[in-house]
Image (cartoon, coloured by chain):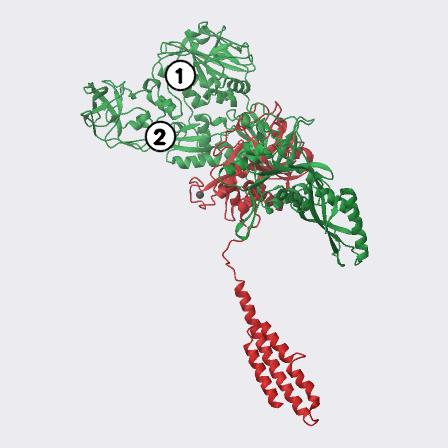
Chain colours: A green, B red
C-alpha cells in the first residue's frame, strides 16, 4: 500500500510532522513503513511552458523546433517527441534543472539549432512508465489548458509529495484504504478525521427503472449495489485525480474508471463500471459460472471458468469475473454515455479461490479476499456517483438497485480492565483504556467496570478479547510493558539422553577432524535412493519447483558427495565432511513418512599432511573405520561392533562392508566405486552412513569402574602364515575363543604379503596379553593358555606358525 | 718409595687434566685407583716395609689417593657438564618449523548458533522438543489458527506431498504436538529444526532453512514475561549492552503479536549499514499464544496463557558474522565452514 501524505492530509491533519517521524510513529504503532519515497527526488527548475510555435527541424526529421513561453521569456527548445504540437501546455526543464537519475539540463545546440531546456515526459520526472497514461506513454505529457506558463510544475503534478510504502500484515486490511490509514494516523496523533462529504443532485428517473438485478449466488455475493449514471462524458480526469492515482501506483485511464479506482483507494471498496448500453439486456445476474464457460477479461485474455467461479452476467453471458476483473465486452469506452457502478460484497474465500485459479491478483481481489467493510458498500457507491456527477457531467438516477442479505452488526466484545492488565503484566487505568479506544474511534461503554465494545466493521481484525488487548497495548506503547520472568513450577531444563548423545557424536567427529555439513533434504528422483541403507517408497512433492528438488532423500551420501565435488572443483583436494539429518522412508499408518535420523561421512584426499617430517597419508578404508570404531567406543559399544564385507551398488566391491551392532546391520562403510568417482569428478573417496537413531537408542551397559590392575600382565607374540582369504577378524575370533578368560587383549601388529611368503598366503602377527586381576600369572599357566590358542589356529585356520 | 709416590701423583694429576671426555677420565681412574693400579700395588707392598715406617707411608699413600680422587671427581663434573652441553647443542631445533597438525573439524555455523540458543534456554529451565519435518496440514496450519483458505497461508507457500501432508513451513507444529501431548500441563520448550518453503534460492531466500522457536504455557503467563525473557536472551546472544524494543505485528497463532528489534550491535544505535541506518535490527517474531491455539490443544485459555517466539538461525548467523549470502550455509564450502572453528567465549 502506497500512501501519499498529500492525499492523506485531506482527511487528517499531519501538518508540521516530518514524513520520517510520521513513518516511525506508524511503524511503532503496528504498521511497518517499508520505505519513504520523496516524489520530487530533488528536482528543481521544472516549470509550465506554452508551445507558441512548433516547426520541423530542417536538418532532422524527428526533431521539432519549438518556441516556448516559460513565463519570464519565450525561448527556443528542440523537442524530439512525436506528440509535441503548437498550443500545448507542457513540462519544461529549464537550463540548470536536475532531473531524477542525475540528468543535468544545459543549453545545447542540436543540428545547428539552439535548445534552451527540455520538454519532458512523465518518465523523465521519475514516474514509472507503467503508471503513465497510455496517451502519453510514448511522448511528452500535456498539461491542462489552464496551466500558467512559468508556474512550478512539481506541485501541479503532485510531485511535491512524500509517499509512505506500507508493508501490511494480513490482519490489517483496514489500512488498504486512505480512510483506514486516516483512522490509524488519527488515533496515533489523537486527532479526529474528516470524512468525505457526499452530496449530489439526483435525477428524477429511478435507477431501478433502467436496471434489473438478480443475485442467484447469495452466499458468495450477499450484497450488491448498482447505481446508474446517464449522460456522462468520458474524458481525461482532472490532474489532481490523475496525480493521486499515480502516487498510489495506479495508472489513469479515463474519468469514470479513474473515479472507481479513486474510491477503491479511498474506501478500500472495489467498484466496477459497466457501459450500460454494452450490457445490452438492462439486467445484471450474479451467479456461478457454468463449467467451461469462457470470458475475455479487460486484459484481453480469454479465461475458461469452473462451476465455483462467481460471475456477473447480463443474464446471458458473463460480463465480469466477480471481484477479480471486468470483462472486455462491457468495458467503459470513449463513447460510453450511461454507466452502471457496481459496489458489492463478494465472499473472501470465493474471490481468493478464483483469483488464485486464474492467476490474477488485482487491487480489487486483494481487498475482497480480506473482507471489505459491510457498512461502506453503499457509501462507496454514493461517493463514486457524486464524483461522476462532478467530473464526468453525468446525471445520477435516483436510488440504487440493491440486493442485500449481508450481516452488518458490529462484533460485541466485553472485557475487564483487570483481564487486560493481567495478560500484559502491567497496570493501565480504565480511564486510559477508554481514551485509547476513543482515539481509535472504537465505540466503547463502561458498564459495571467492564469495557463493552462494539468493534467497528472496518476493523475486521477485532473479534476477540485478545484483539482488544493488542489495541490497548500498541497504543499505550510496548515500551511501557515491564520486563519480568515467568513464574512457573521450576523443572530442570536440559537435553534428552538422545539429544545429549547426538552432541557427543558431533563433538567426537569434529575432534577427529571432520567438518559438519548441512545439505538439502530434497533431491532428484534419480539420486533419492542411491547408497540408501534401506529403501522404501519415496516421498514426492506434488508440485516440485524443479526435478532436482522433487523428492525427499533416503540417504545422506549423495548430497555429501556433491559437497565434496564442489570443494574439489575449487582445488580443496582434501575434504572430510559429516552430516546428521533425517531420511524419509515410505509411509507410516498416520500418512507421514518414517523419518529416521542418519549420520553420514564422506572423505577424500589427504588425511595426514605433515610431509616435512615424512608423515603424509591419504584417506583410506581404515582411516574411516578407525573413526567409526572410535565413535562407537565413545558411545559405549566397544565390543559389540563388527564389520562384514558387503556388495553395495555404487561402492567398490572389494572395499565395502556392512557395519553391525550386536549382529544387526546399522550402517555401511567403504570406498566409492571408481565409476561413481569418475562420474562425480572425485579421486579416491570413502563414505559411511549409519542409522543414528538406532545407534543412539541402543541400550548401553552402565559405566562401572574396573579396578586398575595390581598384578603384571604377560604378553606373547604369534606370527602366522595363513591363506590370503583368511580374514584378520576370523583369526582374532579364534584366538579370543581359545584364549579363555586369562586372555585380555589381542592386537594385530604386522601384516605382510609378497617376497618370502608363499603365493596365495600372507604373514600376520598378533600380540596377546594374558592377565589375571587376582594374582601374578605363572609361566605354566600362560604357556597352557597360549598353546590352546596355537592349536586352535592351526586346526581351525590352517595356520603355520613362523619363527 | 716416597719419591715414587710423588711421581705417581704428578703423573696421575697430569693425565686427569689431559683427559678430554668422560671415557678417557674413567680409564685414568681405573689405571690409577683400580684394583690393579699402582696405588693399590703400593699399599699391597707395604707389608714389606719395616713396621715403624708403615703408619707414615700409609698416611702418605692415603693423601695421594685422596688428592687424585678429588682431582678426578672435579674433572669428571666438568666433563659431564661439557658433554651435556654438547648434547643439548646437538639437539637444538628450528622452533619456527610447522607443527604436526592436530585433527580439526567444527560445527556448521547454523549448529553453532542453534546450540548457543538452546544452551541459553536450557539454563532457563527449557527442554528441547523436536518433531517431524514432513507434517500434517493439521499441525502445520489448522492447529495454529490457520484454517484452510486463511489469507495468512499465503505468507508461507508450501511444498505439499498430498492434500493433507506437506513439508513443515515452520517449527510451530512441534509446539502444537507438544501441547497436545502434555494434556494441560505447563510447558517450557525450545524447538529447533529444518523448515521448507517454496522459494527460489537466491542471496536472501532458501527453500530449506532453519528455525528455532520457543513456547511457554502455564497459569498467569504474561506479556511482560515474554519481554523479560527476550531481553535476557538478546543480552546473552548479542551483548550485555543490547536494548530491545517490541513492535506490533501479526502472526495467526499469537495475539497480541510483536516483532522484536535489538539495538544495533555494530553501531550501538547510531546508524550503520548493518541496521540500515535505523539503529535497530529485527531479530525475531513473538506473541501471546492465540486462545484458539490453546483451545485446540485442549487447554482452557481463560485459565492458561502462554507466549511463543521464533527466529531464523540463518539470519542471526548472517548478522553476527556478516555473511552476505544465505546460500553459503548450504554449499558446504570447507573454506566457509572452517572459519567457524574458533571459540567466541
Ligand atoms: Zn547499526
Residue A774, located in which quarter of the rendered image?
A: bottom right
Residue at disc 2, secondary structure: loop
Whether residue B9 can be seen here: yes
The answer to whether the residue bearing label 1 lies less than 8 angstroms from the nearest atom of ligand 1 is no
Q: For this rendering, which residue is in front, A542 or A711? A: A711
The quadrant of the rendered image in which ligand 1 is seen is: top left
Front of the two marks 1 and 2:
2
Q: Which mark is residue A257?
A: 1
The tag earlier along the polypeptide, 1 or 2, is 2
A337 vs A713: above or below: above
The chain containing the residue under callout 2 comes to A
Q: For this rendering, which residue is in front, A401 or A297? A: A297
| Crowding at mark 1 (Cα within 10 Å: few <14, some 14-19, many 20+) | many
Q: Please tell me if label 1 and label 2 are on a single chain.
A: yes
Residue A53, located in which quarter of the rendered image?
A: top left
| Crowding at mark 2 (Cα within 10 Å: few <14, some 14-19, many 20+) | many
Q: Position of residue A408 (x, y in %)?
A: 54, 20
The answer to whether the residue bearing label 2 lies less than 8 angstroms from the nearest atom of ligand 1 is no
Amino acid at each position: 500500500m502506497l500512501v501519499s501524505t498529500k492525499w492523506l492530509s485531506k482527511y487528517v491533519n499531519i501538518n508540521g510532522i516530518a514524513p520520517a517521524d510520521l513513518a516511525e510513529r506508524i511503524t511503532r504503532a503496528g504498521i511497518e513503513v517499508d520505505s519513504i519515497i520523496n516524489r520530487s527526488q530533488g528536482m528543481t527548475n521544472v516549470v509550465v511552458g506554452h508551445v507558441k510555435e512548433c516547426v520541423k527541424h530542417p536538418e532532422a526529421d524527428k526533431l521539432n523546433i519549438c518556441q516556448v513561453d516559460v513565463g519570464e521569456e519565450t525561448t527556443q527548445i528542440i523537442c524530439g517527441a512525436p506528440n509535441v504540437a503548437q498550443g500545448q501546455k507542457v513540462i519544461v526543464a529549464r537550463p540548470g534543472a536536475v532531473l531524477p537519475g542525475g540528468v543535468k539540463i544545459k543549453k545545447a545546440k542540436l543540428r545547428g539549432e539552439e535548445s534552451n531546456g527540455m520538454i519532458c515526459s512523465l518518465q523523465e520526472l521519475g514516474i514509472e512508465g507503467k503508471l503513465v497514461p497510455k496517451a502519453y506513454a510514448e511522448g511528452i505529457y500535456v498539461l491542462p489548458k489552464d496551466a500558467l506558463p512559468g508556474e512550478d510544475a512539481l506541485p501541479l503534478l503532485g510531485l511535491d509529495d512524500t509517499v509512505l510504502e506500507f508493508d501490511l500484515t494480513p490482519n490489517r486490511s483496514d489500512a488498504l484504504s486512505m480512510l483506514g490509514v486516516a483512522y490509524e494516523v488519527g488515533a496515533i496523533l489523537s486527532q479526529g478525521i474528516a470524512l468525505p462529504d457526499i452530496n449530489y443532485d439526483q435525477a428524477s428517473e429511478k435507477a431501478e427503472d433502467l436496471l434489473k438485478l438478480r443475485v442467484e449466488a447469495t452466499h458468495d455475493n450477499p450484497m450488491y449495489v448498482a447505481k446508474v449514471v446517464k449522460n456522462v462524458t468520458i474524458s481525461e480526469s482532472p490532474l489532481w485525480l490523475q496525480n493521486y492515482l499515480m502516487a498510489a501506483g495506479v495508472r489513469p485511464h479515463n474519468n469514470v474508471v479513474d473515479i472507481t479506482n479513486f474510491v477503491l483507494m479511498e474506501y478500500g471498496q472495489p467498484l466496477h463500471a459497466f457501459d450500460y448500453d454494452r450490457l445490452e439486456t438492462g439486467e445484471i445476474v450474479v451467479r456461478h459460472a457454468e463449467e467451461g464457460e469462457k470470458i475475455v477479461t479487460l486484459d484481453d485474455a480469454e479465461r475458461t471458468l469452473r462451476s465455483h467461479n462467481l460471475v456477473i452476467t447480463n443474464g446471458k453471458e458473463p460480463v465480469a469475473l466477480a471481484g477479480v476483473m471486468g470483462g472486455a465486452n462491457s468495458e467503459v469506452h470513449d463513447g460510453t454515455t450511461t454507466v452502471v457502478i457496481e459496489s458489492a460484497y463478494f465472499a473472501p474465500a470465493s474471490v481468493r479461490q478464483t483469483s488464485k485459479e486464474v492467476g490474477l491478483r488485482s487491487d480489487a481481489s486483494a481487498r475482497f479476499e480480506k473482507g471489505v467493510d459491510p457498512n461502506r458498500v453503499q457509501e462507496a457507491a454514493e461517493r463514486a456517483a457524486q464524483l461522476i456527477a462532478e467530473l464526468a457531467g453525468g446525471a445520477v438516477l435516483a436510488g440504487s438497485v440493491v440486493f442485500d442479505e449481508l450481516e452488518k452488526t458490529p462484533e460485541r466484545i466485553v472485557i475487564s480492565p483487570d483481564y487486560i492488565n493481567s495478560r500484559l503484566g502491567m497496570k493501565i487505568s480504565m480511564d486510559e483504556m477508554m481514551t485509547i479506544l476513543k482515539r481509535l474511534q472504537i465505540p466503547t461503554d463502561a458498564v459495571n467496570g467492564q469495557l463493552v465494545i462494539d468493534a467497528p466493521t472496518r476493523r475486521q481484525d477485532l473479534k476477540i478479547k485478545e484483539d482488544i488487548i493488542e489495541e490497548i497495548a500498541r497504543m499505550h506503547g510496548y515500551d511501557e510493558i515491564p520486563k519480568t520472568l515467568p513464574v512457573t513450577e521450576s523443572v530442570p531444563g536440559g537435553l534428552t539422553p538422545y539429544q545429549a548423545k547426538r552432541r557427543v557424536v558431533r563433538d567426537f567427529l569434529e575432534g577427529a577432524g571432520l567438518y559438519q555439513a548441512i545439505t538439502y533434504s530434497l533431491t532428484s528422483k534419480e539420486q533419492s535412493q542411491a547408497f540408501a541403507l534401506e529403501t522404501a517408497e519415496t516421498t514426492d512433492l506434488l508440485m516440485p519447483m524443479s526435478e532436482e528438488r522433487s523428492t525427499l532423500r533416503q540417504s545422506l551420501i549423495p548430497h555429501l558427495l556433491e559437497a565434496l565435488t564442489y570443494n574439489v572443483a575449487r582445488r580443496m583436494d582434501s575434504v572430510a565432511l559429516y552430516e546428521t539429518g533425517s531420511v524419509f522412508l515410505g509411509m507410516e499408518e498416520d500418512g507421514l513418512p518414517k523419518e529416521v535420523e542418519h549420520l553420514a561421512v564422506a572423505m577424500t584426499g589427504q588425511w595426514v599432511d605433515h610431509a616435512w617430517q615424512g608423515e603424509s597419508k591419504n584417506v583410506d578404508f581404515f582411516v574411516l573405520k578407525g573413526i567409526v570404531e572410535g565413535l562407537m567406543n565413545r558411545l559405549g559399544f566397544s565390543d559389540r561392533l563388527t564389520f562384514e564385507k558387503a556388495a553395495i551398488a555404487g561402492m567398490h566391491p572389494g572395499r565395502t562392508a556392512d557395519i553391525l551392532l550386536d549382529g544387526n546391520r546399522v550402517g555401511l562403510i567403504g570406498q566409492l566405486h571408481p565409476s561413481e568417482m569418475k562420474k562425480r569428478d572425485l579421486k579416491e573417496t570413502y563414505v559411511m552412513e549409519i542409522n543414528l537413531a538406532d545407534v543412539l537408542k541402543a541400550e548401553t551397559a552402565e559405566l562401572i569402574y574396573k579396578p586398575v590392575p595390581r598384578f603384571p600382565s604377560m604378553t606373547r607374540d604369534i606370527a602366522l602364515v595363513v591363506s590370503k582369504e583368511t580374514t584378520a577378524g576370523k583369526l582374532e575370533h579364534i584366538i579370543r575363543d581359545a584364549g579363555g578368560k586369562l586372555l585380555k587383549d589381542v592386537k594385530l601388529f604386522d601384516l605382510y604379503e609378497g617376497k618370502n611368503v608363499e603365493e596365495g598366503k600372507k604373514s600376520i602377527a598378533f600380540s596377546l596379553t594374558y592377565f589375571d586381576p587376582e594374582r601374578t600369572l605363572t609361566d605354566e599357566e600362560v604357556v597352557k593358555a597360549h598353546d590352546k590358542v596355537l592349536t586352535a589356529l592351526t586346526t581351525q585356520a590352517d595356520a603355520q606358525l613362523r619363527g | 718409595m716416597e719419591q715414587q709416590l710423588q711421581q705417581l701423583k704428578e703423573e696421575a694429576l697430569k693425565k686427569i687434566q689431559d683427559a678430554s671426555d668422560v671415557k678417557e677420565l674413567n680409564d685414568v681412574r681405573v689405571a690409577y685407583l683400580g684394583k690393579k693400579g699402582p696405588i693399590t700395588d703400593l699399599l699391597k707392598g707395604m707389608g714389606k716395609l719395616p713396621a715403624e715406617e708403615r703408619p707414615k707411608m700409609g698416611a702418605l699413600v692415603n693423601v695421594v689417593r685422596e688428592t687424585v680422587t678429588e682431582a678426578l671427581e672435579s674433572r669428571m663434573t666438568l666433563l659431564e657438564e661439557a658433554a651435556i652441553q654438547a648434547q643439548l647443542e646437538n639437539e637444538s631445533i628450528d622452533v619456527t618449523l610447522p607443527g604436526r597438525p592436530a585433527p580439526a573439524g567444527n560445527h556448521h555455523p547454523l549448529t553453532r548458533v542453534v546450540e548457543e540458543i538452546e544452551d541459553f534456554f536450557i539454563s532457563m529451565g527449557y527442554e528441547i522438543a523436536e518433531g517431524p519435518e514432513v507434517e500434517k496440514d493439521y499441525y502445520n496450519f489448522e492447529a495454529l489458527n490457520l484454517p484452510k483458505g486463511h489469507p495468512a497461508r499465503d505468507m508461507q507457500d508450501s511444498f505439499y506431498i498430498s492434500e493433507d501432508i506437506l513439508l513443515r513451513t515452520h517449527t510451530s507444529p512441534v509446539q502444537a504436538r507438544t501441547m497436545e501431548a502434555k494434556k494441560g500441563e505447563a510447558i517450557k520448550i525450545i524447538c529447533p529444526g529444518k523448515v521448507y518453503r517454496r522459494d527460489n534460492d537466491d542471496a536472501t531466500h532458501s527453500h530449506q532453512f532453519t528455525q528455532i522457536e520457543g513456547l511457554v504455557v502455564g497459569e498467569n503467563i504474561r506479556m511482560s514475561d515474554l519481554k523479560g525473557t527476550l531481553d535476557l536472551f538478546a543480552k546473552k546472544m548479542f551483548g550485555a549492552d543490547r536494548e530491545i524494543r517490541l513492535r506490533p505485528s501479526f502472526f495467526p497463532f499469537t495475539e497480541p503479536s510483536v516483532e522484536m528489534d535489538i539495538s544495533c550491535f555494530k553501531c550501538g544505535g547510531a546508524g550503520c549499514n548493518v541496521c540500515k541506518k535505523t539503529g535497530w535490527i529485527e531479530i525475531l517474531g513473538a506473541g501471546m499464544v492465540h486462545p484458539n491455539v490453546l483451545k485446540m490443544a485442549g487447554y482452557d485459555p481463560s485459565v492458561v496463557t502462554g507466549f511463543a517466539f521464533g527466529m531464523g538461525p540463518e539470519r542471526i548467523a548472517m548478522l553476527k558474522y556478516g555473511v552476505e549470502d544465505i546460500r553459503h550455509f548450504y554449499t558446504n564450502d570447507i573454506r566457509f565452514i572452517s572459519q567457524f572453528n574458533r571459540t567466541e567465549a
